[in-house]
Image (tube, grey):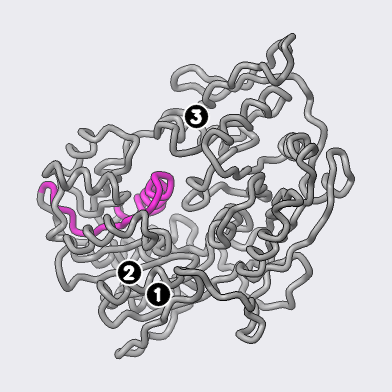
Amino acid sequence: MPRTSRTSRPPAHGRSRARGPQAAHPSRPQPGEGEFTQPTPVTPALPAVTSFAELSMPAPLLATLTRQGVTAPFPIQGATLPDALNGRDVLGRGRTGSGKTLAFGLALLARTAGRRAEPRRPLALVLVPTRELAQQVTEALTPYARAVGLRMTTVVGGMPLPRQANALQRGTEVLVATPGRLTDLIDRGACRLDQVTLTVLDEADQMADMGFLPQVTRLLNDVAPGGQRMLFSATLDRNVDALVRRFLHDPVTHSVDPTAATVTTMEHHLLHVTEADKHDTTAHIAARAGRVIMFVAMKHSADRLVRKLTACGVRAAALHGGKTQSQRNRTLNGFRSGDLTVLVATNVAARGIHIDDLDLVINVDPPTDHKDYLHRGGRTARAGQSGTVATLVLPSQRRAMNHLMSRADITPHNTTVRPGDPELARITGARTPSGVPVDVTAPAGGQARPRHTAPSRRGPRDSQPARSARGGRPARSKTSR
């Protein structure tokens, strides 16, 4: 994995740009918005490294990095690992796709290696906000955990709770969990955190939101006092302050990217459409040759859009919190393999889903928060690759969207488009859908196979809902791996 270039260049129009302090938006920050109060460490931070060989890590971890093709640390890794390996509490901020998982994961595994957990009493804990992020963290760290003989267990909602409880009973050194499911297991007596000496909050800004904060606070109170705590995210704002003040001791902050979306390989477009043209514009974009993630506001909106897209010939499936975990796994597998070309998602996919070579993200429904915009857009232009983020904007949404772009420190391209416009095709690869309905189905354990179906005499509006896409084999439980 080559190291990404950090050469700066002047921002082009339509690309992300970070502003200086004097260029800040004049409006007052809302509660929870703006920069968090960066703590002043008593102990100075250690200098960053440019090679993994400079770090004091177990030899099996270094050998596994080489086998995985990780030849040099990304900036967030080179900055945070010296302090994290030294046992410091760490606040790490780096843009989505910058390598944060290995930044905290290597330190966690190196400091836990050689220890053995008792039944139901893990030694290290990674808290994440979504099931998909939990699985991604587990998959990313499993080769390294195996190299040093550590057992990993993932506990998330939507999966059988008894199976997860059994995995904890057998013993696990590293636990990756969503707060709700972990709280359930603790309440049932299936897990205790009193021996957890290293805790990580991934996507710390979301974990500090009021919806998660009571559970996160309880869990941090349950871990062993005096242990190491690390908070990582692409954005850190004022919500994080409460957790930092209460649970971190003399933390060191490493920020390799500002809060703004400064990815110079990412282009941002606001596509102005009328209400009458919005659906056809969306369908034309969905019919492009490559894959695309389309974000909508609500679960029912995702399902409705999938029905419309499959009715006009687009292989699409929905991903949201109303799906079971096995359905979500099959949909993601189908999208990764190319059996599905459109993933219609709510914000559940905005954090923690990594899709290789994804070059387009579409906000069918604009986000209401600039942080959500940054995390949605972070599904593309990962690890130095290029990508485009385009948002469909109705006339009534223009003012709010302009304000959101300002909060995110982004100057976008603004283009008025209609279905079939050359500019729409240039920006997104849009083309006219085939109009032949498809039914994306799969046999149990099989690959998703789109089947063309005879057009309904009743027309697309009355077409039956497409069944859930099933791509690849059902994901195995990641317990004790």
Percent across and percent down for residue 257 are 54, 73
Q: Amino acid at mark 1?
A: Thr
How crowded is the residue under tag 2: few (<14 C-alpha within 10 Å), some, or many (20+)? Answer: many
Query: Which numbered disc flags the more N-terminal residue, 1 or 3?
Result: 1
Task: Identify the mark nearer the N-term, 2 or 1.
Answer: 1
Horizontal side of residue 240 vs 301, given as left or right: left
Q: Which residue is mark 3?
A: 472
Which quadrant does the N terminus fall into? Answer: bottom right
Q: Residue at x 36, y 49 (%)?
A: 138
Query: Considering depth in this image, is 204 or 414 the residue closer to the camera?
Result: 414
In this rendering, the answer to whether 60 lies above or below 342 is below
Looking at the rendering, the stretch of residues picked out in magenta corresponds to 119-145
Which of the two discs, 2 and 3, labels the residue nearer the N terminus?
A: 2
Q: Is residue 253 magenta?
A: no
Numbered circles on residues, count: 3
Does residue 279 sit above or below 271 in this rendering?
Answer: above
Answer yes or no: do the residues labelled 1 and 3 have beta carbons within 8 Å? no
Q: Which residue is mark 2?
A: 230
Residue where numbered disc 1 is placed = 80
Query: Which amino acid lies under the numbered mark 2 shown in the image of this protein?
Result: Met
Classify mark 1: helix, strand or loop: helix
Residue located at (33% from left, 87% from top): 41
Secondary structure at numbered mark 2: strand
Q: Residue at x 80, y 59 (%)?
A: 414
Image marks 2 and 1: residues in contact by CB distance under 8 Å? yes
Task: Give percent across and percent down for residue 171.
Answer: 15, 46
Verify whether residue 138 appears in magenta.
yes
